[in-house]
Amino acid sequence: MTGRGFEVVRAYAQAGIALPVRKTAGSAGYDLAAAETVVLPPHAVTVVPTGLKAYMEQDEYLSVFIRSSLAFKKGIMLANSTGIIDSDYYNNGDNEGHIMLACYNTGDVPYTVEKGDRIGQGIFMKYLTVNGDGATAVRTGGIGSTGRK
């Protein structure tokens, strides 16, 4: 695959998932929405599926952030602060590259994310490697697979 973009994963093919868009010409991020309704209990990490996967060039990644309005107004944050979706995560054997957001509710009451609510934003980025980088391994799975032995 060349270029960059988003696709719906097979498991959500019939779920009416919209592909992310930027809301203004000056926006860096593509809005990511919840693929289903999820309740975020207080003081807990909960996975929110997007029903999406992203493809990009080999020297790129997708940075994923919580929407600032959720952080400021509702106390919702990403458990990993910033999500990094590597180019080889696309179509991996474990989950097809499904982008899922690990959300943490800092509040004292549950917060419901409704299907279609914009919860995150993704920004495509280039990255650099060091001289002599000899990485040749091939991803064999999904989340956390590059650390498996």
Image (cartoon, helix red, strand yellow):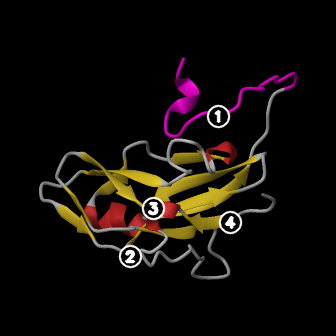
Whether the residues at callouts 2 and 3 have beta carbons within 8 Å, the answer is: no
Whether the residues at callouts 1 and 3 have beta carbons within 8 Å, the answer is: no
Q: Quadrant of the C terminus?
A: top right
Q: Along the horizontal axis of the image, is 48 left or right of 82?
A: left
Residue 92, label in figure: none
> Which residue is under mark 4?
5
Dot 4: what SS? strand
Where 39 falls versus 31 (above or below)? above
- Alpha carbon distance from label 1 to label 4: 20 Å
Task: Look at 22% across and 45% down and name the residue there.
Answer: 44
The mark that comes first in sequence, 1 or 4, is 4
> Which residue is under mark 1?
139
Which range of residues does the magenta coloring cover? 131-149
Residue 70 in the image: state x and y as whole percent.
34, 65
Task: Look at 78% across and 57% down and name the residue there.
Answer: 1
Residue 11, label in figure: 3
Residue 101 in the image: state x and y as whole percent.
41, 53
Furthest residue in direction top, as rendered:
149
The mark that comes first in sequence, 2 or 4, is 4
The mark that comes first in sequence, 1 or 3, is 3
User: Is 134 contained in the magenta span?
Assistant: yes
Q: Along the horizontal axis of the image, is 149 left or right of 136?
A: left
Residue 116, label in figure: 2
Q: Nearer the viewer's eye, disc 2 or disc 3? A: 3
- Alpha carbon distance from label 2 to label 3: 16 Å
Could you tell me what secondary structure mostly forms the magenta stretch?
loop
Q: Nearer the viewer's eye, disc 2 or disc 1? A: 1
Q: Within 10 Å of the Cα at label 3, are there few (<14), some (14-19), or many (20+) other Cα atoms? A: few
The mark that comes first in sequence, 2 or 1, is 2
Q: Callout 2, which amino acid?
A: Gly
